[in-house]
Every structure is written in structure tokens, then in C-alpha cells.
Amino acid sequence: MTKQLAGNLYDHPRYYDLVFGSDWNAEFQFLLACFQRYAGCEVRRVFEPACGTGRLLYRLAKAGFESSGLDLNPRAVDYCNRRLKKHGLPVSAFVGDMTDFRLRRKVDASFNMINSFRHLTDGALAEAHLRCVARALRRGGLYVLGLHLLPTSGTPINGESWSARRGNLSVTTNLWIVHRDAQKRLEHYRMTYSIYTPTETYRLTDEFHFRTYTARQFDQLLARVPEFEVAATHDFAYEIDRSTKIRSDTEDVVYVLRKR
């Protein structure tokens, strides 16, 4: 018998970490390569807004970086800090708002890899977030920001499915768009998670909204935050030696932003 779980995926950090953490190594290696190739300073301190369970944060800490992050969800932050502590690393994640934060010390790089930025469904909040990150960075520091653009030609991808396994736990995820309003720049998504353990099966259903960005709209946003320049653009293949030229049908983009 399948049991229904209450709440959203962020309230179940163990499952969240599996759903979004199974391909961490490609992102991790890409970040290291970005730090080396594009930063105008030596990267030693890194920061992740909307860090969730810290799937990349703690691995960067293990690699010797001074790492910190924030997230709105206390359960995710607790999971992240317990994992850092388990590995003998400083507890450095805290509950906070990605549109309104200040760090005690400037960092050399920041990153937000999987569309969390698009949860900011208001343009003023998106701008506030970029200004917060710019304020937190040293001159020459990087903000590596991954998001899906809304293409202006062709047919956008409206859903995807994937599975992940860790030990005896596996999760199958289905994501699809319920409604897209290009005028209001909102997408309404629904996700279902089928969770399998050796003794139980669970199902979790979640819904959320994303702000849409065409390439032009994102450029307009960046123009309002002149502290940043675009150092490079890549796609979600995370190949450092292959940059992405943004076209009308481009969807997945990693913007490597550098503080002027």
C-alpha cells in the first residue's frame, strides 16, 4: 500500500538530496573549472544561496573551500549542518532569505545551479537577490547561476522524469507544467515523487511556481545590476571547454557572472 506524505519535497530533505543530488559530480567539477578559468581572484571562500541540503556545499568544504549557505527551509538547513558536522566540517548553513542577506566576510564565488533563482516570482525580488550576491562578492568574484530560459522559437520542454537510487532508497520523479502564462511570466508546475524503501512505498505531490525569462528578459535584468558582467555561458552538460551561444531556442543555460 502506498502512503501519502504531507508537505513539500523541501520538508523531506533526505528525499530531496537524492532527487537533486545524484549527478552532483558533474556540477562539482564544473564549478572547480569555473573558479580556475573565470574568476578574477583566487577562490577560497564560497557561498550558496538557496543551498537546500548542501549537496554541493559540503563537497566543496571537503575539498578545502571555506563554504557557507542559506536556505528558507529550517529542515533543509538542519540536514546540511548535520552532514557537515558528520564529516568534521564547520557548521556553516543558516536560515535566511536569498533576497535579503548580508555576509560578515566577502566571498570569492557563489553558485545557484538548479533553477532555485526562478522561485523568485517577482522582478524586484530577483533584482534584490542579484544585488545581495554582488554585495557579498569580492571584485572579480563569480556567481555561477543555472536556469532554464523560455525559448522564443520552437517548442519548450514541458516536463521530464528521472530516477535516483542510494543504497536501498530509490525515488522516481515526474515533473510537468500545469500552466504557463507568458504575459504574467509565471509557470505553474506539479511534481510527483514515488519513494521506495525495502518495506514501504510513499508518494509525495508538490506544486510550485517559477518566473519565466526569455534571453532578452534575463539580459534586461542583468542590465539593472551593473555590478555583474557575463564572463561565459554554458549549458547543463557542464563542459567547461564548450561554451553556449544563446539563441532563440536555447533553454538550459549556466550564466557565469563576474563582479566588476
Image (spheres, grey):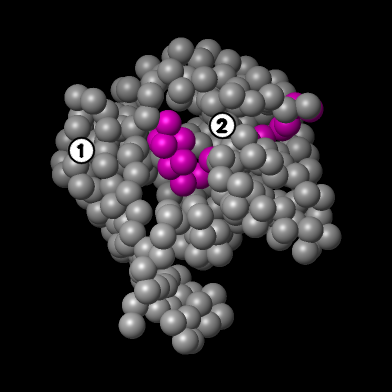
Q: Position of residue 238 (x, y in %)?
A: 49, 50
* Residue 168 to residue 109: above or below: below
Q: Amino acid at mark 2?
A: Met
Quadrant holding the N terminus: bottom left
Instruction: Give the number of the disc on residue 201.
Output: none
The reply to whether discs 1 and 2 touch (Cβ–Cβ < 8 Å) is: no
* Closer to us: 159 or 36: 159
Q: Badge 2 is on which residue?
A: 98
Side of 37 where 3 appears, left or right: left
Residue 221 at x, y percent in the picture: 41, 19
Residue 204 in percent (x, y) is at 37, 63
Find the magenta span and give its range.
105-120
Q: Is residue 93 left or right of residue 126?
A: right
Identity of the amino acid at label 1? Arg
Quadrant in which the C terminus appears: top right
- Residue at left offset 51%, top offset 55%: 11
Q: Residue at x 78, y 39 (%)?
A: 44
- Tell me the distance, in whole angstroms, between the alpha carbons under discs 1 and 2: 25 Å
Q: Residues within 10 Å of mark 1 (few under 14, many from 20)?
A: some
Residue linked to disc 1: 180
Can see residue 260?
yes
Relative side of 184 to 203, left or right: left
